[in-house]
Amino acid sequence: MSANSPMTASETAPVGSILGTRVQRLEDPEFLTRGATYTEDLTDERLTGAARLTLVRSPLAHARITGIDLTAASQAPGFVAAYTAADLSGVPPQRPMMPGYPESMVQPLLADEVVRYVGEPVVAVLTDDRYSGEDVAELVEVDYDPLPAVVTLTDALAGDTLLFPAAASNVCYRKDAEAAEDIFAGCEVVTSHEIVNQRVAVAPLEVRAAAAVWGDDGRLTAWVPNQGAQGTQRQLARMLGLDKAQVRVITPAVGGAFGAKFGADTEHALVGWLARQLGRPVTWVETRSENMVGMTHGRAQLQTVTIGGDRSGRVRAYRLHVVQDSGAYPRIGALLPSLTALMAPGVYDIERLETSFVSVVTNTTPIGAYRGAGRPEATAAIERAMDLFATELGLDPAEVRRRNLLPAFTEPFTSKGGAKYDSGDYPMALEKVLAAADYPALRAEQAARRERGDVRQLGIGLSVYVEITGGGDESGPPNENATVEVHPDGTATILTGTSPHGQGHATVWAMLASEQLGIPLEKITVKWGDTDLVPRGGGTGGSRSLQQGGAAVRQAAIELVELARQRAAEQLEANPDDLVVDHRIAGLAVRGVPGTAITFAALAEREPLQVRTVFSAPGATYPFGAHVAVVEVDTETGKAELLRLIALDDAGTVINPLIAEGQRHGGLAQGAAQALLEEVCYDPDGNPITTTLATYPFLSITEVPSFELVTTETPTSYNPLGAKGIGEAGTIGATPAVQNAVVDALAHLGVRHVDMPTSAQRVWRAIRESSATERTSG
Amino acid sequence: MRLSLRVNGEERSDEVEPRLLLAHYLRDVCGLTATNLGCDTTSCGACTVHLDGESVKSCTVLAVQCDGSSVTTLEGLAGPDGSLNPVQQAFRSEHALQCGFCTPGMVMAVSALLAEHPDPTEQQIREGLEGNLCRCTGYHNIVRAAQAAAAALSAEQA
Amino acid sequence: MIPAPFEYVRASSVGHAVQLLAEHGEDAKLLAGGHSLLPMMKLRLAFPSVLIDIGRVTEARTLKVDDGMVSIGALVRHSELAASDLLRGEAPLLARVASLVGDPQVRHRGTIGGSLAHADPAADLPAAIVASDGVLVAQGPSGQRQIPAGEFFLGYYETALRPDELLVEIRVPRTGPGGWHYEKFVRRANDWAIVAVATVAGRIALANMASRPVRAAAAEQALASGAGPAEAAELAAEGTEPIEDLNADPEFRRHLARVLTRRALLAAAG
């Protein structure tokens, strides 16, 4: 078998293989007895005597800072120092986050003259301990002159108030539609709708934190919970005007990230700067209330979908226009609509496609990546559009999808959106999930309840999705490095450029190496996240890790076997071609002469037995699936309850089903949460209203059922594992399935659309408005 | 003021500020950092410990309120040789933790739930854990772990 | 996240607590379970300079039937109320409502006295006490006084308790035969009620329909005049002043009050 041929788990795995089995995590005993060491838990001696940072943040959405008085604060017990923007000597002017963003739209480390969102850091207060931090911060006096707040997308586009006067407008990024012709010409049916893909809070259980100290060697060591130490290192160096070599980032255990802990925020950079300024280590942990306004939010698109086709149910044309709320300072959120546009047509064979988007700044928390990052938005739009189209035609939503799905394929082809899909079988996914859900029985139950006029009506929602995982970046095709070393004591160490924060790489990477080498899992240690140890890496996000990082580990182990083979041949005076891996001894033996063998450990005695390799993939992969959601809506109160969520997700070969299922469950819950419950709200003045976990309806255990998973494996040819990315599937498929289900529950009452979250009040309003419409039109 | 109590079976006596939260007392004074803080509105339950045998959110208890009491944290559950108890083992075998941040509080909450309801239905498990938030697992495997732990505990007693 | 600094003293008895209140004046707050007060202090929405811990005052932790009424010590915790066979038998509405406050951890600490004295109009126990026609017993320097539930709650976080008094006992009539029910409408299971309806012995009280729990007097009168549950429930929102918040505007709240009242009355009727 060549190193690059595609394989399913059953091909890669000889009899007795560990791959494809439900291996319990090696990480867990520590997590379950002492707890993992998160940044707030650090007791590193380099942090002895650290000062504690507390930030004073803007209480206004848009204002000019007219004065800062530190007198009272500086006299309070525990006070060490306080800094404002004027004090940040040596910090270079900040650069736009992405090339292509307007030059002036940058966030300084501390607000300089103007604050642009509630929560923007204004004053950095240092105290000897955490408790006095809040006492001292309360005594800082900041005077503001309010400016008009730009909160709605309409206001942002109108541009009567500019967040950045130096910029011509509030637009930070755009792609206009290309086609001049009317793509809907000739369509028998056309329907259009405005859809809100609402702003949500990422809200990982661990908030943001950082610890920093400067060494006598002039280097900054920073401990930051992140999704890729190398990216955080680059970002910190950029923000502080340092050489990358001057910065070492160490990644403690990370308590969840979901896209919002990439790179570095202004606070992280501040901690680094303050440590040098003070000549003393500095630590920082935000409060949850700070996190709810200070960490980037997700989604926040206003979508206009137009879908047209034949009465027979064949879609001919689809247009998607997106207005992306970027928040006050454009970060990756402003760019995500390009992924939405790329994935706009989804799994459907649509002749004519038109996409366009405009990203604007508003006086709100900046928008970043959140599990799915641009792709849930695409799927939500096309899946809502398909249901709107089906309703317009009076056709069953499953049937309309059937008539429009791309047929199964094994050779890569380029979609109308410009994405090169690698492999997929969407019709199979739809049929299998409908069978698993017993779709006809559900429709029968729904019909019976409608007939009886039950108060509690049933809704069935579908989604069929394809998504993009593991893409490369400006530097080239997708790739990841891994180093595998076997030690003379028989243990092994793996260095990876990925950065797990719950995904179980310490277990799965060990499985992949153990598969090749025969070394037992408990003897394999996986390391990541220290830029001195692993200088290069792409981190963990975009569901890239297994298909690139795991593939790299496998490749490194295979190459290590080859290196060992050469040494063993010399030592055993055998022909290298006669040597085979003997898993029982974790070494090499002469074929047919098991007594003549040598362990990998022994081969490491004279010189290190270590290989570093880089695995490169031809491109991104495209996992797919189909979800069915069953909801019950109390038509008197509007409350929607999710009864069942049946999910088929196909991300190619599954290496550890226990972990893969866990990833799916988490995504499904977050996807359902967006459809049913969660929303970040601002008042017209730009004051955030949902700033705690009490006011923000973070999904709790009673709002979701146990999930029903259906698994298929359609491998990719892009890596020898045959694996695509699974981490974001849940959010992408579940959100539209659940939203469609709620609308479906009300379809017989004339309701065509309910925006997310489908709160009781929204649903109740939708019912009343449609029955009012029926009365006036009847 | 002086605070005397038992933490994970060991007697302690410390001088503390009245406003010191029990959670911070456990983490910063006792050095028991498994208990995490995930919010500031008593919502998330990551800080759940046992106070005199009952589950409480240690972020909303003052250390000084615990004078003379007994507190158990996650670190107090495992056997002296580090072996996992049935609840801990169930969390592992059912993959009921991913990033691990909510886990110490979740394990303490499940332990307390099973002490009150040794044979809970799925509904009772979900209602019993409504004070504990998790972002990673979607709760599915946490429910499985509670069920597996219940079975293991009742087998132990049989 | 961290309360402002304060002095802390422990009361060993009700009398001692009254004495400490008098000594420290308006800057002092009573600390029982702390699950209404401490969350506010952690967000620095409240910053008393003295906390008087009454958590160990065992004389206020009794639960018994006395003189034909159910007598509940103010320091009895929600979890104890929910589990009490006595309460389930004699005042089942309260036992049920106590089981729905917050979550299990909160119920292990929160007390009925603390919840009532805090007087959040969206809370469960205030509405239940008003529906139960309970009597709240306050102890002050000049002795005890009895405050009917209907006169106890004055507005947001405002009660008839004087600064030098503490709540020591809650007395409710024994329910006897006849129905009771609690309907709590929430977004997530352990949220505060968007609207809730408590009914017992023909009385109906609403949570989160005004700045304090209110009796649905018009609906009660209709019932008393022989109207059926559905008809009476149509009047449930009369005399209420529901607010607009994230979850519901006044119109939706009034609608919910009617729907939930109907359901509560039907359930109570068996």
Image (cartoon, coloured by chain):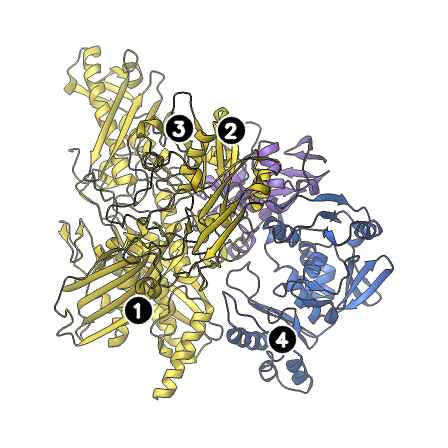
**Residue beneath the point at 35% across and 19% down:** A490
Q: Is residue A466 shown to the viewer in this render?
A: no
**Do marks 2 and 1 share a subunit?**
yes
Task: Residue B7: name its quadrant.
Answer: top right
Does residue A610 sit above or below A95 in this rendering?
above
* Colour displayed for chain B in the image of the structure: purple
Inspect the image, locate mark 1, and give the three-letter code of the amino acid beneath it: Glu
Find disc 1 in the rendering and name its residue.
A194
Between label 4 and label 1, give the one nearer the viewer. Answer: 1
Spot the blue chain and give its letter. C
* Colour displayed for chain A in the image of the structure: yellow
- Of the two numbered discs 2 and 1 on the same chain, state the one appearing first in sequence: 2
**Residue beneath the point at 17% across and 43% down:** A717
Residue A638 appears at what percent x and percent y? 46, 71
- Of the two numbered discs 2 and 3 on the same chain, state the one appearing first in sequence: 2
Residue C270 marker: 4
Cβ atoms under marks 4 and 2 closer than 8 Å = no
Furthest residue in direction front, as rendered: A66
Find disc 2 in the rendering and name its residue.
A43
Does residue A282 sit above or below A419 in this rendering?
above
Inspect the image, locate mark 4, and give the three-letter code of the amino acid beneath it: Gly
Distance of mark 4 from mark 1, alpha carbons?
Answer: 46 Å
Which chain letter matches label 4?
Answer: C
- Between A410 and A635, the one lying in front of the other is A635
